[in-house]
Image (cartoon, rainbow, N blue to C red):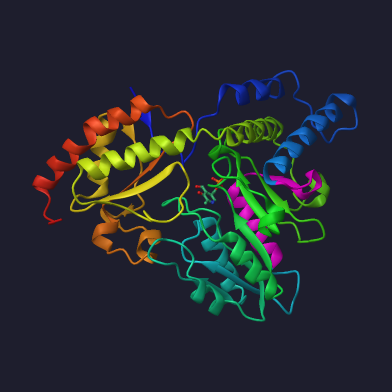
Amino acid sequence: MKIYLDNNATTRVVPEVLDAMIPFLTERFGNPSSFHSFGSDIMENIEKARKNIAELIGADAEEIIFTSGGTESDNTALIGAVEINPLKPGLVTSRIEHPAVLETAEYLAGKRHPVAFSEVNSDGTLNMDSFENCISEQTGLVSIMMANNETGVVMQVKEAARKAHEAGALFHTDAVQAMGKVTVDVKSMGIDMLSLSAHKFHGPKGVGALYIRKGIAIPPLMLGGHQEKGMRAGTYNVPGIIGLGKAAELAAEHLSDKSGGTGLLLDKLEKGILDNCPGAVVAGANTERLPNTATVMFKGVESEAVMTMLDIEGVCVSSGSACSTGEQTPSYVLSSMGIDPVDANTAIRFSLSRYTTSREIDYVMEILPPIIEKLRKISPYAY
Ligand code: PLP
């Protein structure tokens, strides 16, 4: 038995999505850019997928371009937007963004763009004082993620967008982790650009989209073709785009089902852990989080050991820390929240999906407390 609780890393492609994709991997293999009907008929299906994405985020279809995923969408938005206005070459972002944003920001800083990183609070939300101090007359773009991939903490996107606009800057959000988990409406939230990725909400890997509000003209990242009105060169990933469109349609259906399934299971898991594993602490416990994500620190026991023992018992989770040259490096997200590095190295991320079952959570609660207890007995750290 395998219990997969690492859905923020990636999700399963659901049968409806696979079924929608198969014809485009087999008999409908045409190139949508072809003039003959074998190719151009396929364009209609691509446009349907575009419409589904637009509907999921409250945008118009023509405001969506298809990309290879969240990383490319983030790169396109950031690298493009700081080029628009020479008087506003600056970027403001936060310390806890995904590397697709952080490393692009570092790259832009290396190209002499003024880049500032806002601090976050101890609960993982944006520190508004620090954020406001980062914004200057030179700021042309603000990029703040909608929800953090490690903690699930939902950021104050609407407020950040308002402050960006007051300073005459555009606002981009990396909504890769938020899609399909919380309602997203670009218009009411004041979002100018938004990145999303299919494989985080039961679509295929290697495909995503970037929303660019009508009227904003950023230069493309990929050159060499007229696809996507010149905004994203390269032959269409047809099966991927069809899968993304279907995943978006299903996500919208599940979001409108307010039964709170995943959220209730997450509550059950968190309560079970807090009641049965003394000293466990949930990161961002008292703030709004995605209904599927809990990062828990089991003080005194290294996360690598917990992860390995859970894996042996068939439960797949992840930790925020990276293992380099045999040393564990604490997660920069947890460190930015002011969490002690020793504690940060004990963090385990549980990320559920709408396919997680109550029985799976029961099983985790059967095996987890004895694992923690056993590891604590041999741990050199007190808790
Ligand atoms: N942004 C966030 C918040 C993510 O969690 C991820 C993936 O983990 C990405 C961007 C990158 O997306 P992709 O894997 O589609 O390139």
Q: Is residue 73 left or right of residue 93?
A: right
Find out whether residue 61 is within the magenta segment. Answer: yes
Image quarter of the N terminus: top left
Residue 203's spot in the image, x, y percent?
A: 59, 33
Q: Is residue 118 left or right of residue 56?
A: left
Image quarter of the C terminus: bottom left
Query: Of all residues shown, which one is farthest toward the top?
Result: 27
Q: Is residue 92 left or right of residue 41?
A: left
Residue 242's spot in the image, x, y percent?
A: 70, 31
**Residue 173, relative to residue 355: is it above or below?**
below
Q: For this rendering, which residue is in front, 223 or 306?
A: 306
Residue 2 seen: no
Query: Of all residues shown, which one is farthest toward the front?
Result: 259
Quarter of the rendering containing residue 192: bottom right
Residue at 81% from the left image edge and 46% from the top image edge = 62
Q: How many dots with numbers?
A: 0
Residue at 61% from the left image edge and 61% from the top image edge = 158
Q: Write down the region rendered in magenta.
A: 58-81
Q: For this rendering, which residue is in front, 375 or 71?
A: 375
Residue 75's spot in the image, x, y percent?
A: 62, 57
Q: Is residue 17 left or right of residue 268?
A: right
Specify the principal SS of the magenta part: helix
Residue at 68% from the left image edge and 46% from the top image edge = 57
Query: Of all residues shown, which one is farthest toward the left?
Result: 377
Q: For this rendering, which residue is in front, 273 or 60?
A: 273
**Residue 165, relative to residue 172: is it above or below?**
below
Residue 217's spot in the image, x, y percent?
A: 80, 61
Residue 226 seen: yes
Residue at 78% from the left image edge and 61% from the top image edge = 216
